[in-house]
Image (cartoon, rainbow, N blue to C red):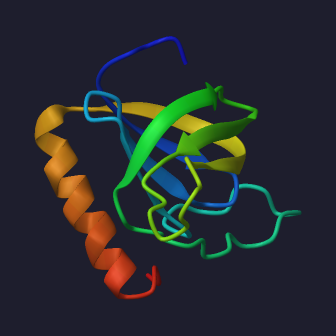
Amino acid sequence: MDVVSGAYTVTTSSGSRYLIDLDRSELSRMPRVAENVDPGFWEADDLRRDGETLQLLSIDELTVGRPAVFWLGDVADYPGYAGTRRTTTDVVDISQVAKLDVAELELALSGAASHGGED
């Protein structure tokens, strides 16, 4: 991904969806919100801090057809750690989101997180 601004949803083959806001350097993840498009793959697992807005330090890889690799910060609950690496299943879609839609997506992500991510 060769852009440096804007907001995007990223959907992976396991059915997880990420909201990435490059202007605010933030990322949120919600598992099992999209159809699992890889029948040979298991269902997305819950990860620590799903549905929370996390500090996005960098994106090492974000290309349709390949796993995304993100570096996340704000891991204050682990003293001494500067960040953590998150690698996804293959990315199946990257869509730009209008700024007006970002607040709605964040609300939807936080609501789904409080219900355990279940549909």
Q: Nearer the viewer, residue 94 or 67?
A: 67
Q: Residue at x 59, y 40 (%)?
A: 70
Image quadrant containing the N terminus? top right
Tally of numbered tags = 0
In the image, taking residue 89 as reference, residue 92 lies left or right, namely left
Splitting the image into 4 quarters, where does residue 56 fall? top left
In the image, taking residue 3 as reference, residue 89 lies left or right, namely right
Residue 39 appears at what percent x and percent y?
82, 63
Q: Point out the residue furthest to the bottom here.
A: 115
Splitting the image into 4 quarters, where does residue 91 fall? top right
Q: Is residue 110 above or below residue 72?
A: below
Q: Residue at x 52, y 30 (%)?
A: 58
Q: Point out the residue furthest to the top here.
A: 2
In the image, taking residue 40 as reference, residue 19 lies left or right, namely left
Residue 53 appears at what percent x and percent y?
34, 57
Q: Nearer the viewer, residue 9 or 114?
A: 114
Residue 93 appears at what percent x and percent y?
56, 37
Image quadrant containing the C terminus? bottom left
Q: Is residue 58 above or below residue 74?
A: above
Q: Nearer the viewer, residue 111 or 59?
A: 59
Q: Point out the residue furthest to the left here.
A: 100
Q: Is residue 65 above or below residue 40?
A: above
Q: Residue at x 76, y 33 (%)?
A: 66
Q: Is residue 9 above or below residue 53?
A: above
Residue 85 appears at what percent x and percent y?
66, 47
Q: Residue at x 71, y 47 (%)?
A: 87
Q: Point out the residue furthest to the front here.
A: 80
